[in-house]
Amino acid sequence: MSNKLYILIITFCLSCNVLANKLVSDNEALIITFDNPVDGIGLHNISNIGFTITTIDDNPVAGLGFTVEGGMPGHGHGLPTAPFITEQGSGIYTLNGMKYSMRGQWLLILKVVSGEYTDDQFTLVLNVSL
Amino acid sequence: MKKIARFLSVLFISVLSSISIKAGDIEDAIYFSLRGLPPFPVDKSNYFQQNPDAIRFGGKLFFDTDFSFSGDVSCASCHFTNSRFIANESIPAGQSRNFRMVMQITGAAYNRFYFWDGRIDSLWAQALEPIEHPDEHNLQRHEAVKYVVNKYAKDLDTLMAQSDGYQKHLMLVHHWLTSQNQSLPIESINHVFALIGKCLAAYQASLPIDRTMWDEVAIAKINNQPLTLIQEKIWQGFNIFKGKGRCSACHDGPLFTDFSFHNTAMPTVSVLGIEVGRYRVLPEIQDLEFGCHSIYSDAGKDDCLHLKYLNKRIEENFGAFKTPTLRGINNKTRFGHAGQFSSLKAMIEHYNAPPIGTHGKLINQQSLSELQPLSLTEQEKGHLITFLEAL
């Protein structure tokens, strides 16, 4: 995806309300709930963050495959690690290998690439601080 | 009445925003100075990383010129000048070292990948490369081990008493040294060789980071003290560094590095041609002979997270080099991994009007460089240099 598009998303999302641990997918079909804040792992630590996926009416969604993309659009660089998502079982997943190399605004896109809901995604605008 | 209300609200807003700017200043002063430096991360692949005996022994090795083929090269030859841990630029790197400039070892323990291209994944493993390199210590591995086992027997014994792992290997090496016609106990030699690296790493990790003029400015800001004229200029330069100059997009935090790899459209050195940089070393880096995953590492299977989650994307690694620390940069006269620039001014001109860059153009992509033109004024460039010189 081009930088311009990232920046567009960010400007757009500055007005949308990213709840601390909970977010609706771009197609408004899914809800992601993180066990801990995605932006709360500090700097330079490689961490895993658990999350659950449900439908809007609160039914767990199993069997989704994801890609993880992101970076700092304002700086022009991507994520320092190559995180990936694994599923523990019916609707319970882990985002493995997240790391932030500096404070500031990060963009994280968790895209559904297999299973039901393919092509829906979660767009997270994160403000990483110390 | 209305007027007063408006005046009051403007006043209120401006007071609020000036408070928040002040708070931001203090936060930044902490974030970019020694005040904000966390302890270095524990390297699980090096059991001895914080062991005082290993630190002491590593310090002896670091300065030992007999620990080389010629008898006059030590780590200090290239990394210690005028009684300080600064790079010695008078030892030029030749073709066999890709003309790479000596790096600073300031804050080395905060890094996760070593060398300009990050081809080594642990500080202790890094130390082993110069020992064998023909242009550096130029020792064969078994000669290096033989020398250390003979000269530093006492230091090794002290360490052995604290870890069972190496005792067997040290005994096998002793056995090889004392009995004739024995074939090399290669694995044991490698273990002792790795131990040498671990002690050198422990020593380097133990080195304090010099407090500089910049840290003084930051402390003054944090304590809300008035700045001197020159300090004021340094602060202005800092504001350009993290603002319009975009430098902190990569030179981030108290060590002025994000420890990551970036393509910054560095000029090509004619003898080197296009350099693949970080991307070239990625295929091997998860299986190095000496590294976090190797049998000489003290890390458990799941401790090498930097290898497990390695970013291998070509877009982010082709032509990329490690962001170097900028601390002590005023001691350098040549800048860039191959010494491409001979002044800070020239380096800043490069950032101000960056070329598209030759290291890495992919099909359909103009450039992999992350740089954007800055349009800095001459005055801003001057402030920026004043700031860099205070680091």
Image (cartoon, coloured by chain):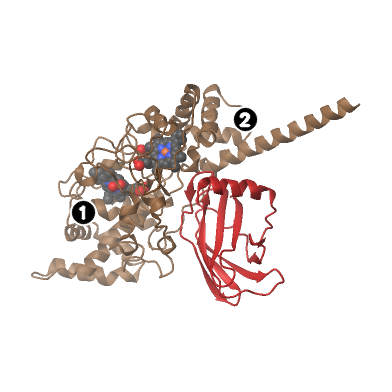
Q: Is residue A30 left or right of residue B97?
A: right
**Can you say whether B84 is above or below B157 in the image?**
above
- Camera-nearest residue between A78 and B217: A78
Q: Chain of mark 2?
A: B
For the image shown, how many numbered marks are present on the structure? Answer: 2
Instruction: Provide the residue designation for mark 1.
Output: B132
SS type, badge 2 = loop
Mark 2: which amino acid?
A: Gln
Which chain has been coloured red in this picture? A
Front residue of B168 and B365: B365
**Residue B155 can be seen in this image:** no
Q: Nearer the viewer, residue B261 or B38?
A: B261
Q: Which mark is residue B225?
A: 2
Mark on residue B49? none
Residue A64 in the image, given as x and y percentages of width and height = 56, 71
**B340 displayed left or right of B353:** left
**Extreme residue toward the right, this view:** B1
Q: Are marks 2 and 1 in contact (CB under 8 Å)?
A: no
Q: For label 2, count other residues whose C-alpha is less than 10 Å away and answer few (under 14), some (14-19) or many (20+).
A: few
Residue B336 percent location from the top left of the image = 34, 38
Sequence-wise, the earlier of marks 2 and 1 is: 1
Q: Position of residue B69 (x, y in %)?
A: 15, 49
Question: Which amino acid lies under the numbered mark 1 shown in the image of this protein?
Answer: Glu
Residue visible at 64% across and 62% down? A25
